[in-house]
Image: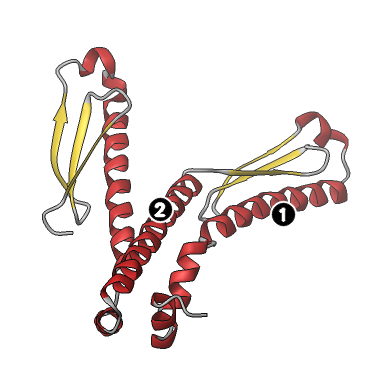
């Protein structure tokens, strides 16, 4: 992605950050109205917000490029398959290929968005009676644990331990569900992976053979 430039701003539009294709900040712009619209106490946060948005654009572009890139040997197979087709059939296959790649790029972007949302989330779990709450981060680091102060005065140790364990299980279950959602591949991505798994599969798909 050499030579590419990605720009993003914070929610107010007063802070702007530009990154190159490697994710490095190459320019920063701040409006003269930042004191009125952002405020001194929020300037660092606004800079971070703009940087994060620009970085997301870089990641999205990079993933889309990787999804559409074919190994040299496979590219040769594609070229040979096109060359062996009648012109009209070759054009139709090219359109179908481009459409599939666009779908893969869309799925990749959506998957990155889910990953971003997951990494910015916290996962809270509780016991059945909601006496204990555990909050974990995507890294599985425990963010906090709270216990109902009135309840813990009279609860037995066994019940307390069980409630804490249940809260942990609940929190981790929510985290794993989020991880599974991010890990899942879209239909177009799965289709492309199947097609390029072998030259015969690619040839048959290009020719719409069953």
The residue depicted at 25 percent of the width and 80 percent of the height is: 79
- Residue 201 location, quadrant: bottom left
Q: Which dot, 1 or 2, sits closer to the camera?
A: 2
Position of 48 with respect to 34 (left or right) is: right
In this view, 149 is above or below 7: above
Earlier in the chain: of badge 1 and badge 2, it is: 2
Badge 1 element: helix
Image coordinates of residue 200 in percent, x first then y, are: 42, 87
- Residue 72 location, quadrant: bottom left
The residue depicted at 47 percent of the width and 63 percent of the height is: 188
Q: Which residue is mark 2?
A: 106
The residue depicted at 83 percent of the width and 38 percent of the height is: 129
In front here: 152 or 40? 40
Could you classify mark 2 by the number of other residues whose Cα lies within 10 Å: few (under 14), some (14-19), or many (20 or more)? some
In this view, 27 is above or below 24: above
Badge 2 element: helix
The residue depicted at 50 percent of the width and 69 percent of the height is: 190
- The type of colouring in the image is secondary structure
Distance CA(mark 1)–CA(mark 2): 34 Å
Number of numbered discs: 2
The dot on residue 169 is: 1
Position of 89 with respect to 7 (left or right) is: right
Image coordinates of residue 16 in percent, x first then y, are: 20, 32
Residues tagged 1 and 2 counted as in contact (Cβ below 8 A): no
């Amino acid at each position: 992605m050499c030579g590419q430039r990605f720009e993003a701003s914070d929610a107010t539009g007063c802070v702007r950050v530009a990154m190159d294709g490697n994710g490095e900040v190459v320019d920063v712009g701040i409006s003269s109205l930042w004191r009125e619209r952002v405020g001194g106490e929020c300037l660092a946060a606004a800079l971070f917000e703009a940087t994060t948005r620009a970085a997301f654009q870089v990641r999205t572009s990079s993933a889309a490029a990787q999804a559409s890139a074919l190994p040299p040997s496979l590219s040769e197979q594609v070229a040979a398959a096109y060359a062996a087709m009648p012109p009209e059939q070759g054009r139709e296959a090219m359109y179908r290929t481009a459409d599939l790649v666009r779908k893969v790029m869309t799925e990749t972007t959506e998957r990155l968005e889910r990953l971003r949302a997951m990494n910015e989330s916290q996962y809270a779990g509780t016991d059945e009676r909601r006496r204990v709450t555990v909050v974990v981060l995507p890294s599985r680091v425990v963010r906090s644990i709270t216990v109902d102060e009135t309840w813990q005065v009279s609860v037995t140790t066994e019940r307390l331990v069980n409630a804490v364990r249940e809260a942990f299980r609940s929190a981790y279950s929510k985290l794993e569900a989020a991880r599974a959602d991010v890990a899942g591949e879209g239909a177009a991505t799965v289709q492309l992976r199947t097609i390029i798994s072998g030259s015969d599969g690619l040839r048959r798909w290009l020719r719409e053979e069953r």
